[in-house]
Image: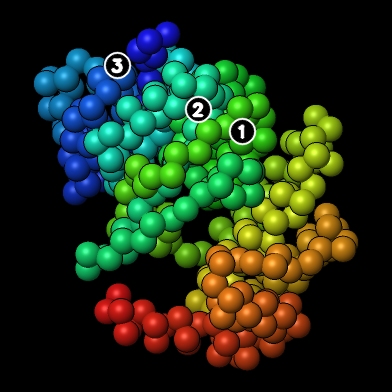
């Protein structure tokens, strides 16, 4: 398998302003043995027209049309239709480094990996970008699907859960846990757009935040069904902490519904106590001592219903920092 076929799955829905940038990054890859599965999820803007224009110039592009069903269903269709021995995923408002696929293929040929994980840049607007580093465990490889290259067989028994807002969280850690040989590439090979107003990152809704609870529980239950939860106990605890406490911490201060905030954090505490009765704060969150202290204090405040103090500790210093950086 000197030149394995790599299938790149791109769900597309009303992203005409970003789609050409995305497609250009794929068709110009230095590794050319690829198939590009563009799954049009019922777009109503010019996205489908753009896809046909690119397909006319590059026969590696396959367009799969479907009625709108959400990103999870679009990715599932792409997985089902993929012919490649390996899969990569790309969101249509993001883009790849020109050498991304080649770097993954090099790792595959060197070590016959089941899974390759790489770093990415988070685009924050006004020219700012942040290098996000990942690990290889289920709690630190990232719950997004697009900073990875998968042996297709990893997906034989799994699909993205449909009908949830944070569907990635419910399946990607499970996939990582099932990979027997994982290789890490210490390069940022993906560019993640966070400034688009309609993106999932910028869409905040209280009911959607409950999906984080449902999805983390699903990961635990899937691994428990196969007797794998004991092996990954500490990783699962850190995953729950990161997504039910730390990630929600960034969102909770922006929820104006006081009762909603109270009920959400009560539910989070119940879940943490149920699944990990002896749970502890991780020693480090992001490697920054001062940030770790703020996180721990803020979580303590929120868990004890001291929302005003929690906001003062976390929300306002963060807003001031962003203002100083011009974000």
> Quadrant location of the C terminus?
bottom left
Residue positioned 53% across, 29% down in the render? 115
Say which residue appears at 47% left-offset and 53% top-offset: 133
| 10 Å crowding of disc 2: few (<14), some (14-19), many (20+) | many
How many angstroms separate mark 1 from mark 2 (CA)?
9 Å
User: Coloring scheme of the render?
Assistant: rainbow
Q: CA distance from mark 3 to mark 2?
A: 16 Å
34 sits left or right of 210 in the view: left
- Locate residue 182, reporting x and y percent: 57, 32
Name the N-terminal-most of marks 1 and 2.
2
Looking at the rendered structure, the secondary structure element under dot 2 is strand
Residue picked out by circle 3: 33
Q: In the orientation shown, which residue stands out farthest toward the right?
A: 277
Apparent side of residue 151 relative to residue 102 in the rendered image (left or right):
right
| Tag 2 residue | 150
Q: Earlier in the sequence, mark 3 or mark 2?
A: 3
Residue assigned mark 1: 175
Q: Which residue is more in the foreground, 40 or 145? A: 145
Which residue is pictured at 35% across the width and 42% down the height? Answer: 189
CB of mark 1 within 8 Å of CB of mark 2?
yes
């Amino acid at each position: 398998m000197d030149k394995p076929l790599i299938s790149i799955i791109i769900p597309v829905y009303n992203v005409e302003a970003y789609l050409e940038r995305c497609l250009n990054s794929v068709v110009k890859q230095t590794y050319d043995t690829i198939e590009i599965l563009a799954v049009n999820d019922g777009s109503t803007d010019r996205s489908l027209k753009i896809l046909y224009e690119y397909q006319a110039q590059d026969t590696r592009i396959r367009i799969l049309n479907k009625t709108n069903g959400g990103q999870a269903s679009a990715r599932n269709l792409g997985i089902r239709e993929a012919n490649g021995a390996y899969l990569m995923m790309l969101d249509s408002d993001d883009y790849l480094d020109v050498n991304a696929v080649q770097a993954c293929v090099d790792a595959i040929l060197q070590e016959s990996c089941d899974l390759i994980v790489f770093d990415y840049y988070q685009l924050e607007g006004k020219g700012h970008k942040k290098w996000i580093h990942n690990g290889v465990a289920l709690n630190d490889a990232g719950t997004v699907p697009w900073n990875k290259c998968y042996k297709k067989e990893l997906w034989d028994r799994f699909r993205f859960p449909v009908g949830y807002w944070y569907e990635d969280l419910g399946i990607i850690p499970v996939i990582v846990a099932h990979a027997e040989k994982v290789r890490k590439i210490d390069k940022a090979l993906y560019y993640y757009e966070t400034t688009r107003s309609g993106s999932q990152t910028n869409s905040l809704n209280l009911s959607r935040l409950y999906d984080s609870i449902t999805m983390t529980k699903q990961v635990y239950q899937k691994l428990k069904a196969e007797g794998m939860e004991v092996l990954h106990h500490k990783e699962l605890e850190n995953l729950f902490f990161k997504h039910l406490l730390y990630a929600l911490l960034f969102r909770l201060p922006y929820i104006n519904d006081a009762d909603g905030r109270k009920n959400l954090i009560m539910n989070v505490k119940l879940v943490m106590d149920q699944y990990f009765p002896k749970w502890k704060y991780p020693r480090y969150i992001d490697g920054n001592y001062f940030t770790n202290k703020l996180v721990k204090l803020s979580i303590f405040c929120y868990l004890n219903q001291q929302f005003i103090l929690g906001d003062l500790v976390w929300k306002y210093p963060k807003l001031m920092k962003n203002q100083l950086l011009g974000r």
